[in-house]
Image (spheres, rainbow, N blue to C red):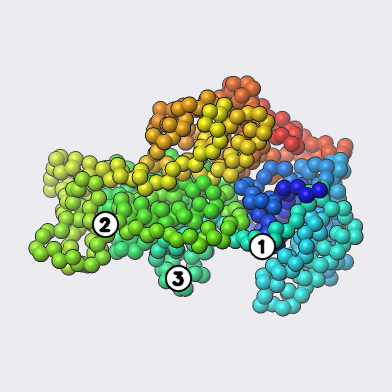
Amino acid sequence: MHMRDVVIGIGGAAGDGVASAGNTLALSVARQGLGVFAYNSYQSVVRGGHSWLRLRIAEHKPLNHGDQVHAVIALNQDTLDRHMQELTAGGAVIYNTAKVKPAYDPPVGVQLCPLPVPDLTPAYRELPVMQNTVAIGALLRMLGMGYEGLESVLQSTFAKKPQVVKTNLEAARAGYEYAAQHFQPLSRQLRPVPDRKWALVTGNELFGMGAAAAGCKFYCAYPMTPATHILEWFAPHAKELGIVVRQVEDELAVINMTIGASHMGVRAMCGTSGGGFSLMTEAVGMSGMIETPLVVINVQRAGPSTGVPTKTEQADLNQALGASQGDFPRIVLAPINIPDCFVTPGLAFNLAERFQCPVIILSDLLLSESNETVDPEWLMQPIEIDRGETIFAADGRDGETYLRYKDTPSGISPRAIPGLPDHLYVAATDEHDEDGVLISDVFTDPVRRKKMVDKRARKMEGVLPYLPPPYFEGPKDADVTLVGWGSTWGVLVEAAERLRQQGISTNHLQIKCLVPFQSEIVGTILQNSRRIIIVENNKSGQFARHLRAETGIEAHGHVRKYDGEPFEPKHVVAAVQTILRTGQKIVECLSEEPGWQTEHPSGASGDWPGRKVTVGKHYALATGSREHTH
């Protein structure tokens, strides 16, 4: 029976090749026309710990990593112990008999698939990672997929090493044929989708591609998970694309070099995570004061301080709203999905240059590090480049004095690139007059000070027409309105659909543009909402507070998650059901994966400990269930 999708879990320790195995599998099915969404939950260690990669593979385009695992590849004993009990009837667990043995009986209807890896590939004795190739070959056979996609991936991956190609092809073929002879096909089967092409990319890679397509010529960063892969994309492409790429000593240098490059007329961008952005915030104010365009990507991770470096969260919104002291214009954008990471840098550059202010892009680990299949045509779309009122050549002023910070009706002043004849000016971080001369060293002129603050603030009045509208889908008069921002889009799309299938009329509003806030549009959408439920990956409800401040609208319910793992559709569905059933205002979700258990199940087939969520005045109780855990 052909089903719409299947979720594969690959688990092991750091160093076991979990990510590379997942990438091989993802590419193998993508080259056969199937859609993929992959999320890797890993630890902040070089070796050891527990990594758990989930791939959702579908004949349509998956929008998230799913919630019910249908098959597991266990690369070590820990993975088998942790995850076997999650499988339901029709599922399977694949493992290397030379390394792993079940410690308890599988759930009813779950197939154990032991692979005698040393017998299938002699190379295993010298290269233990060969177990991954054997397992992937076996899994593809059990999914009903052909061998050609995997063969193509192995040939291209190791193209410069013919012997490595040969060894891997033999191992993959051995696993494929062994599965055909010894294992039953999975209850969920997949079939190729002929003539459909995909690009398999991460959000961070698309940030780099989108910025390059938008004319970025300077990128600067200090490595900080989960933003590092933006730098790693730029570095090998720098020479070919004519982009200056710099890794420097700290985030203070990063943002100041970026502002310097932008001040000289170059489209410049920098990237970091919350801790690095903390160091950058004074310079964000510098960008606002000297009105130099600036684009900063903050890929959020769990905080505060060092926090949990390899886990996701949406808790830096308040940081972006208040970065640096004083009143000055800023724009804050939050891409809603991985394809949106490609177009958002271009929008950010255009806004930064048109309105001569800092633009902060809020991503997070889920969005930036997950892999997703994207239509290649999406990456071929033309990117509009708007340099605003930037002067690149002397315009013959005939003695007219150039005022860099001229007080205009729009608040936007003509920005001359330094060095142009007859366009001399001072750009300093002290308050200044229209010509750039400081008004704070010898005396402070209250009238001029107010004029300049008003002038800068006035720029924000013109931003709204250049922003894309928020995403909205579903019946206008729905009983439930799910509201999210940024990376929760894919989960909420599916959760809304599941709720509708259960007879709960649901629509969905997703916010990308956080500052300035599209209050009129959002207010119009929400004014008739019967029950507004806000979903966000943080403890304090930062977006809920922002929405109330901007529109006066207060949500009827809140679904929050801050354990380091992203939402899954089942979390949202179960939380909404709890709110509707009990009237509780706040539901906090907790992932059962990875490693939430204190002890592994043993003894009776399928037994496993119940999972609890704090119960209190505003909190819901969640009980352990394979199908409906939240």
Badge 1 density bin: few <14, some 14–19, many ≥20, Cα 10 Å: few
Residue at image position (72%, 43%) is 68
Cα separation between marks 2 and 3: 26 Å
Residue at image position (26%, 43%) is 458
As drawn, the residue found furthest toward the right would be 181
- Sooner in the amino-acid sequence: mark 2 or mark 3: 3
**Discs 1, 2 touching: Cβ within 8 Å:** no
Which is more toward the observer, 24 or 538? 24
Judge whether residue 357 can be spotted in this image: yes
- Sooner in the amino-acid sequence: mark 1 or mark 2: 1
Query: Which element carries disc 1, helix, strand or loop?
Result: loop
- Sooner in the amino-acid sequence: mark 1 or mark 3: 1
Labelled disc at residue 195: 1
Label 2 sits on residue: 389
Label 3 sits on residue: 241
Which is more toward the observer, 252 or 54? 54
- Compared to 577, does 49 lie above or below? below
Cα separation between marks 1 and 3: 31 Å
What amino acid type is highlighted by mark number 2? Glu
What amino acid type is highlighted by mark number 3? Leu
Query: Which element carries disc 2, helix, strand or loop?
Result: loop
Residue at image position (18%, 51%) is 406
**Discs 1, 3 touching: Cβ within 8 Å:** no
Badge 3 density bin: few <14, some 14–19, many ≥20, Cα 10 Å: some
Q: Position of residue 572 (x, y in %)?
A: 62, 35
- Compared to 336, does 548 lie above or below? above
Badge 2 density bin: few <14, some 14–19, many ≥20, Cα 10 Å: some
